[in-house]
């Protein structure tokens, strides 16, 4: 079973995919981490993430173990990620990694759940289940603030809201694989829903699709 979950930053993809992976015993891949790892390596080395050749070389060097770096969760990595994610050659390089994960889920899992921006449209267009999560920018910024504060990090709402909106604009307007729901995705607006309700909505959809 392959489940594709797409949507903008802080729409609830991480929480939902962790729960789906646990419920069905699936392997989980947060594909944003791939772009974050590529972007982070470039800024760490003092290079410019807008330089195609540099970004492609960083994508080609990516290894699964790079995804465990806690610094990838930070806003600097997020911002560099959305820059490299707009480069078609970077996306093509990372596509193989993601499709290989879906085709051969690690640990002998019976399938995989992938979260990202173009899983249902480009990476796994034949996925059994496609979900697209959305939420208002204000709700997503509030969630991000709470997440960062829970980790003891400083978080300024207005700055986070502006960064999210900048990132949304870049993700939605890029020429390759822009952020958009697949035609056969169930769209769930999580603005007014808690994590349990989102999970139950997803489960009800999966059950109805499998019957
Ligand atoms: O989901 P995230 O915040 O970790 O994603 C970081 C950036 O990577 C985001 O701005 C968009 C990009 N991304 C993408 O273009 N395609 C994906 N499948 C996942 C993330």
Image (cartoon, rainbow, N blue to C red):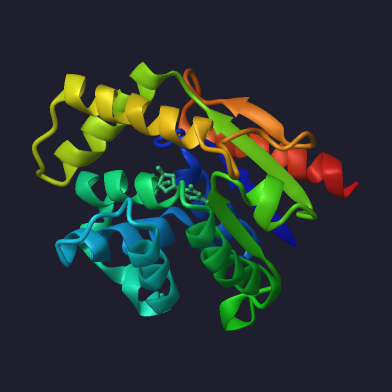
Residue 86 appears in the figure:
yes
Residue 10 is left or right of residue 197, and the answer is left
Residue 127 is left or right of residue 174, and the answer is right
Q: Quadrant of the N terminus?
A: bottom right
> For this rendering, which residue is in front, 7 or 14?
7
> For this rendering, which residue is in front, 117 or 26?
117
Identified at 28% across, 44% down, the residue is 79
Establish if 110 lies above or below 34: below
Question: Where in the figure is residue 72, as x and y percent of width and height?
Answer: 27, 58
Question: Where in the figure is residue 193, as x and y percent of width and height?
Answer: 50, 23
Establish if 30 lies above or below 145: below
Identified at 79% across, 37% down, the residue is 184
Q: Looking at the image, which residue sits at the far bottom?
A: 108
Residue 197 appears in the figure:
no
For the image, the number of numbered tags is 0
Identified at 25% across, 60% down, the residue is 40
Identified at 57% across, 82% down, the residue is 107
Q: Quadrant location of residue 62?
A: bottom left
Question: Where in the figure is residue 41, as x and y percent of width and height?
Answer: 25, 66
Question: Where in the figure is residue 160, as x and y percent of width and height?
Answer: 23, 28
Residue 1 is left or right of residue 173, and the answer is right
Residue 155 is left or right of residue 12, and the answer is left
Q: Quadrant location of residue 61?
A: bottom left
């Amino acid at each position: 079973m392959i489940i594709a979950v797409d949507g903008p930053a802080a729409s609830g993809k991480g929480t939902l995919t962790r729960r789906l992976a646990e419920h069905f015993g699936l392997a989980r891949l947060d594909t944003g981490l791939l772009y974050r790892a590529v972007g982070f390596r470039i800024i760490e080395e003092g290079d410019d993430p807008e330089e195609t050749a540099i970004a492609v070389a960083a994508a080609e060097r990516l290894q699964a173990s790079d995804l465990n770096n806690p610094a990838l969760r930070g806003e600097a990595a997020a911002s560099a990620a959305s820059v490299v994610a707009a480069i078609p050659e970077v996306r093509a390089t990372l596509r193989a990694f993601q499709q290989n994960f879906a085709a051969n889920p690690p640990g002998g899992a019976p399938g995989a759940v992938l979260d990202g921006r173009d899983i249902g449209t480009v990476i796994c267009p034949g996925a059994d289940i496609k979900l697209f999560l959305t939420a208002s920018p204000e709700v997503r910024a509030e969630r991000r603030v709470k997440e960062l504060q829970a980790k003891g990090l400083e978080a300024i709402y207005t700055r986070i809201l502006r960064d999210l909106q900048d990132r949304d604009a870049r993700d939605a307007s890029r020429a390759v694989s822009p952020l958009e729901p697949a035609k056969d995705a169930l769209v769930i607006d999580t603005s007014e829903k808690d994590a349990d309700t989102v999970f139950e909505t997803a489960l009800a959809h999966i059950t109805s699709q499998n019957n």
